Image (cartoon, rainbow, N blue to C red):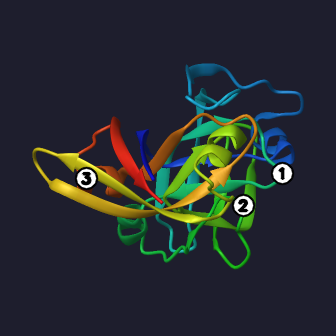
Amino acid sequence: MNFNTRVEVSARHIHLSLEHLEKLFGKGYRLNRTKDLFQTDSFATEERIICEFANGERLERVRIIVPVREQTQLEISKTDAYVLGINPPVRRSGDLIGSEKCRIIGPKGYVNLEEGVIIAQRHLHLDEATAQKYEIKDKQVLSLKISSEEKLETIYKVLARVSPNSFLVCHLDVDGGNAAGIPKIGTGEIFI
């Protein structure tokens, strides 16, 4: 059984815990919404931070995505990792044990993140009703086919992330989007 899905390209970004948000911006600070995202209650902020790595390399102006999370997590692409000279693992969101470390610098302070830098695994967000309709389980691996005039066809393995408040959308990082010929938003077909 196959179905079509929206595909979005997700550039490097960070999710902050409340504790780290307050260390970087000050207690009680409220981040300013600049762009709503497709998922419910998620938005990109006007504020940016700096991420510095043990070798002295830096990422400037890294976008923050809210809502806040239990753990701080920086998501970068494989190309970012090569340029920075680091080796973060490819992981699903929240699986941070043993991942790369960095220092996060904000206007009011910094945080030494002992783990939390990952390359996000390609994934498909879907709500429970859609998951039931297509008999998809959370964390199930699916195939995503993207057809484009430039690249003909690109096929990826994607991880299903079932959540009651999700909308149907597949997320690729910039490397995956470029390889499939999708600059920001496109469509693809899920094969179960």
The amino acid type, in three-letter code, at marker 1 is Glu
From what the image shows, is residue 160 above or below residue 3?
A: below
Q: Earlier in the sequence, mark 3 or mark 1?
A: 1
At 73% across and 54% down in the image, what residue appears?
Answer: 72
- In 3D space, how far apart are the residues under numbered discs 2 and 1 (Cα atoms)? 9 Å
> Which mark is drawn over residue 94?
2
Quadrant of residue 97 within the rendered picture: bottom right
Q: Dot 1: few (<14), some (14–19), or many (≥20) neighbours within 10 Å?
A: few
Q: Nearer the viewer, residue 180 or 26?
A: 180
> Which mark is drawn over residue 180?
3
The amino acid type, in three-letter code, at marker 3 is Ala
- Does residue 96 appear to the left or right of 84 in the view shown? right
Q: Is label 1 in a helix, a strand or a loop?
A: loop
On the image, the x and y values in percent for residue 24 come to 75, 42
Q: Are the two marked residues, 2 and 1, in contact with CB atoms closer than 8 angstroms?
A: yes
Q: Is label 3 in a helix, a strand or a loop?
A: helix
Q: Earlier in the sequence, mark 2 or mark 3?
A: 2
- In 3D space, how far apart are the residues under numbered discs 3 and 1 (Cα atoms)? 33 Å
Q: Is label 2 in a helix, a strand or a loop?
A: loop
Residue identifier under label 1: 70
